[in-house]
């Protein structure tokens, strides 16, 4: 049993507690902007910047390492999308499987406007019944 517990303990990822050291403010700002728009793949609706999950720590370190390799923000996003899918992006790209996500709010607003215009026009065509109780 002790051997099984030891293997489970080794299966846990080792958290690198070393704080990230940025070269300058621009690099730090770029890092924070990037991790703010990437989603934690394990948490419910939290960005990498907000999450305390182990995988978020690992991904922040991964993003930092990719930045140090000289990759652009788009290359880093592509790397993470290739690994985790579009879910990792808070703002999914417009594409074949996300077009409804982008266009649905506008289409629903347009359909609602058409319904309201039709209702108003239909009521405008109906004659107003005379009010028998009115005395003037």
Image (cartoon, helix red, strand yellow):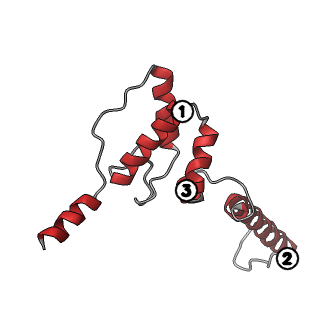
Rendered residue at 60%/37% (across/down): 73
Rendered residue at 13%/74% (across/down): 1
Check whether the beta carbons of the residues at disc 1 and disc 2 lie within 8 A of each other: no
Provide the secondary structure element on which disc 2 rests: loop
Task: Locate residue 89, reporting x and y percent.
Answer: 56, 52
Residue marked by disc 1: 69
Q: Which residue occupies the extreme right position in the image?
A: 125
Residue marked by disc 3: 83
Pointer 3: residues within 10 angstroms few (<14), some, or many (20+)? few
Marked residue nearer the N-terminal end (3 or 1): 1
State whether residue 52 is above or below residue 65: below
Rendered residue at 45%/27% (across/down): 28
Q: Which residue occupies the extreme left position in the image?
A: 2
Check whether the beta carbons of the residues at disc 3 and disc 2 lie within 8 A of each other: no
Which of 7/74 is in front? 7
Marking on residue 127: 2
Marked residue nearer the N-terminal end (1 or 2): 1
Q: Quadrant of the C terminus?
A: bottom right
């Amino acid at each position: 049993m002790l051997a099984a517990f030891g293997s489970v303990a080794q299966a846990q990822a080792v958290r690198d507690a070393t704080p990230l050291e940025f070269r300058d403010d621009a690099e730090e700002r770029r890092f924070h902007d990037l991790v703010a728009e990437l989603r934690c793949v394990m948490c419910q609706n939290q960005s990498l910047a907000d999450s305390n999950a182990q995988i978020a720590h690992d991904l922040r370190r991964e993003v930092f390492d990719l930045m140090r390799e000289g990759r652009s923000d788009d290359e880093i996003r592509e790397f993470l999308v290739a690994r985790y899918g579009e879910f990792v992006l808070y703002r999914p790209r417009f594409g074949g499987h996300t077009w409804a996500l982008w266009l649905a709010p506008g289409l629903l607003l347009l359909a609602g406007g058409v319904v309201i215009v039709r209702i108003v026009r239909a009521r405008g065509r109906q004659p107003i019944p005379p009010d028998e109780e009115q005395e003037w």
